[in-house]
Structures are given as structure tokens and as C-alpha cells.
Image (spheres, helix red, strand yellow):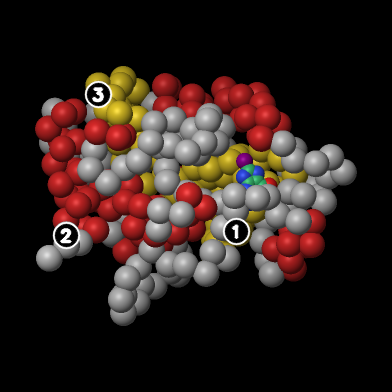
Amino acid sequence: MDKTPFEIASEAAAKIAELSGIEKHDIALVLGSGWGGAADLIGETVSEIPAADIPGFFAPAVAGHGASIRSIRTASGKYALVLGSRTHFYEGRGVRAVAHGMRVAAAAGCKTVVLTNGCGGLQAHWAPGTPVLIRDHINLTAASPLEGATFIDLTDLYSQRLRDLAHEVDESLPEGVYVQFRGPHYETPAEVQMAKVIGGDLVGMSTTLEAIAAREAGMEILGISLVTNAAAGISPTPLSHEEVIAAGQAAGPRISALLAEIISRL
Ligand code: 8IG
């Protein structure tokens, strides 16, 4: 019989424990576009493992995305498991590959996950570099990370408790609804307008499937988007990957400090 995704995840968690020397992690952190430097302020890195050495992970597909699994000891003595690489649905490796990091984090002991991403903004007043708390999502991938008759409640998927805690750090943080498209192309202006009409504030290519998998695995979820560009048609200039990377770099110090402060309170 083939191994289940949960069996592979627990093998991966055992391998991380063995290679890192850390028996149990507390908080998982996924670093998306623009968030790469944000781990450095969280605490002391005690282990760094190439993701490709752990069962079920792949080398990243996009330049600018990291590729390691780090263990960081926070000031409060908790252990954060920092997933520097994420498998995107658009890579075509299937939902198991997308959900794997969440299942591994839960198997490694994490009770909380902080999902970050870079995304397009639908609100014209959100300049590139604006961090936004994810309040809810709309999954337009037509896929689910869950298999079989697995009915999971998604009310309060992006924990109100954790959003309140983030607001204690920065009360000015806006909240928004994240809409995941499959990608890898960016949206047309018409698709961006559709996302707006159905209640979206942010458009991206990650996070929703991971959040669902994280909920299934029993973790509490905080989602933070970095608006790296106005979504297509919201601003008159076309989108470029370079713009996305540049906005992430410019916002780096602020979002790194924000993330570190939030994580210190988890
Ligand atoms: I960074 O404008 C980033 N990722 N779908 N649309 C989508 N994904 C994104 C965008 C965007 N910017």
C-alpha cells in the first residue's frame, strides 16, 4: 500500500527532529515573496536544512523563493519552524505537494502557523509594501487539499484571536479577503474586477490551500499578505516580477519587525 500524505509528513517531521536536534517545534512560518529576510529578527537560527533533504519537499520553482527549513529559537524559548520554500499549486505537482509543509509542521508539533505571501492589491490606497492581515479567503483554484469525504469547517479559518494579537502589535494593519487564483499568469483586469465584485481585496497564487490543510491538521492560522503590486488594471502600469521583488525588498525592514513582534507574542 502507498503511504498516506500523513505518514510521509510524520516521516518528514522525524527527519527534521533528527537533523535539527529539536524534538518539538511550536510555531510554523511560511515565508512568501518579499518575506525572505523576515526570519532573521525572530530569534537565533539553531538549524538550517535544505528542504530537498526532507521527504516530500521539492526544490523551489521560482528564483527569489528560498529553499531551506530553519529552526529558530525565539526570545521566549519557543521553536519556530521556518519553511522558506512553498510548493505552489501552479507547479502542477498536485495538492499533496502543496499541503505537505502544513502536515509536516503539525507533525513536528506546531499548534500555530503564520502564512505569509506577496500578492496583488485591489484597494488603490494600499501602496506596494503594505502588509495586510488576511480576514478570510476565496479559493478560485477549483481544488482542495483534502481527500475523500473530509468535511472541515472553515469558519474563523484566519483566527480572530491571532488577528487581534497582530492588531496589538500594529493597530493600523488593514484586513482583507485573499483570493487565490491558480496562476502562474497574473490576472487580467477583468478577472481582478471579478475578484473585487465577489468580495476580494487581495489576489495571489498561494495560501488558501495551505490554510485549509493547516486547519485540517489542527493548527491555528494567521495569514499576512504583503501587497507588492497593485493588481492588474488597478494601477495603469503593467505587472513585473522585478517590481514584486523590489517592493518586497523595500518593505523588508518594516515587515520583518512586524513579524518578529507578532511571533514573540504567540
Ligand atoms: I507577488 O497581482 C504577486 N502575486 N495572482 N496576482 C496574483 N498573484 C500575485 C500578484 C498578483 N502579485
Dot 2 alpha-carbon crowd within 10 angstroms: few under 14, some 14 to 19, many 20 or more: few
Q: Label 1 neighbourhood size at 10 Å, few (<14), some (14-19), many (20+)? A: many
Disc number lying in front (2 or 1): 2
Label placed on residue 154: none
Dividing the image into 4 quarters, which one contains the C terminus?
top left
Left or right relative to 253: residue 54: left
Q: Disc 3 designates what residue?
A: 47
Q: Is residue 14 left or right of residue 60?
A: left
- Kind of residue at badge 2: Lys
Q: Amino acid at mark 1?
A: Phe
Distance between mark 2 and mark 3 Cα atoms: 28 Å
- The amino acid at mark 3 is Ser
Residue under label 1: 181
- Is residue 58 visible in the rendered structure shown here? yes
Q: Earlier in the sequence, mark 2 or mark 3?
A: 2
Q: Residue at x 15, y 37 (%)?
A: 15
Residue position marked by numbered label 2 in the rendering: 3
User: Could you tell whether 75 is left or right of 126 in the image?
Assistant: left
Nearer to us in this view, 95 or 176: 95
- Does the beta carbon at disc 3 come under 8 Å from ligand 1? no
Mark 2 vs mark 1: which is more N-terminal?
2
User: Where residue 256 sits: x, y (%)?
Assistant: 51, 27
**Distance CA(mark 2)–CA(mark 1):** 30 Å
